[in-house]
Image (cartoon, helix red, strand yellow):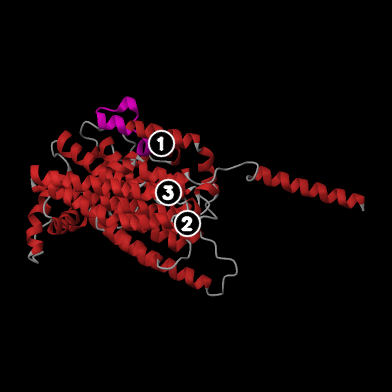
Amino acid sequence: MIATRGARAFRPYGLTLPAIVAVGAFVGLLGWAVEHTSYDTWGGVLVATVLVLASLPPVLWLARKEEDARVARLLPWALLLKLGAALARLAVAFGVYDGVADASTYHAAGTMLAPMYRRGDFSGDVGRFIGTGFLKTLTGVIYAVTGATRLGGFVVFSWMGFWGLYLFYRAFCLACPEGDRWRYALLVFLLPSLLFWPSSIGKEAWMTLTLGLAAYGSARILTRSRGGFAVLIAGLAGTVAVRPHVSAILMVSLVAAYLLRRPPSGASLLAPVAKLAGVAVLGLALVLVVGQTKVLFGVKDNFNAEAVSQVLQRARSQTSEGGSGFNASKSTDLSPSRFPSALVSVVFRPFPWEARNPLAFIASLEGTVLLSLFVAGRSRVVGAIRSVLRTPYVVLCVCYSVLFVYGFSSFANFGVLTRQRVQVFPFLLVLLALPPFSRKEQGWRALLAEERRAQEADVAVRRRW
């Protein structure tokens, strides 16, 4: 461990090599693309080159500050892999599916809105702003700067996704200092779903960025670090603009973690007052988020269990059509005894024998590997669950994962699920990076045995006297 941590383990060439490779490759590709392609292509290469040149210095700076030298060497390569995933995502969206994707809608809207935005005219009709309307507006703003280029748009959104994943990593390092940051970095930066899906013009990339920002703010709040509430509010503002129901799941989880957070040793008499003020702020944010969720789903009455059930049932009926549909559990039947099957459906399915196309087969392989990791690392999961009282961020991750599984178990389409569950993976993967549970060191049996040995030693001392 010592050989991989600290400044002595740092090797500059491990970071400068990807920078040299990236700059040379992008400059050469740009020169060729300008001569042989349209702006839709060479403009995208130009955007990618600018983003690489602008991003590598801060990434290298962050890598030099990284405690684990292995993670330091991984970061610049993770950036390049994430930007490269935009090419794969573009090829699938417009090559395999012939443009039948949400990215086509956002690209067309951004192409139309960009000239208006350059003139200072923001009166373009984008429909309901929360959700699709916000993504159309955001794409228009990006195209107003970069010009209308599909490749450039995919690269920009993929770049957003990278920084979201990095914020998740920083949240883990801050809130779980006992965790294995190398293991978590490998999972969060290299998991195929997190590389592929948040790499196109669409909601997944934006949600990865803003959820990462909200998670980092939550970690700062739960560890009593400065600026946590400001970062959280910035992240929530972004998530509410696209998927306020996911924001509500995050806020409920954060409130639970905040309430279970233990007071620091030697806390002053004002500590309960500060905690009450924090609860009030989080409660107000939760009320506002729930209000936007009601607007999104058209709930006119109270947002109670019945309303939630109706919304989930509607989602089930809307997603059960198409070639990737399957029989999902009815939301009203999701009792605790049915939770394991819902967890398997949301997180790990489709299985290889359920795949109906090459993309679904790749997703099934990932799900199988991920399930194997959870089975092999079950001691880490048990250790994570046992650490909830001393690590509030674990409470947030567990609550978020449980609520997410409950909400999205009504989705009856593998294609939708494989995209949507990238919003839960960074939280769920925390459980695989915490120290494993050891019966020799923990557990009620070990505590009882230790207490019994102490009593026997005390009796022996008394008899001797």
Q: Amino acid at mark 2?
A: Ala
In contact (CB < 8 Å): disc 2 and disc 1 = no
C-alpha distance separating marks 3 and 2: 17 Å
Membership of 346 in magenta stretch: yes
Q: Which residue is mark 1?
A: 370
Q: CA distance from mark 1 to mark 3?
A: 21 Å
Q: Nearer the viewer, residue 135 or 240?
A: 135
Q: Earlier in the sequence, mark 1 or mark 3?
A: 3
- Report whether residue 128 is seen: no
Q: Earlier in the sequence, mark 3 or mark 2?
A: 3
At 9% from the left and 57% from the top, the residue drawn is 113
Q: Position of residue 314 (x, y in %)?
A: 25, 44
Local SS, label 2: helix
Q: Nearer the viewer, mark 3 or mark 2?
A: 3
Looking at the picture, which amino acid does disc 1 mark? Leu
SS category of the residue bearing label 1: helix
Magenta region, main secondary structure: helix
Residue that carries the numbered disc 3 in the rendered image: 71
The kind of secondary structure element at disc 3 is helix
Q: Residue 129: which numbered mark, if any?
A: none
Magenta stretch: give its range: 344-363
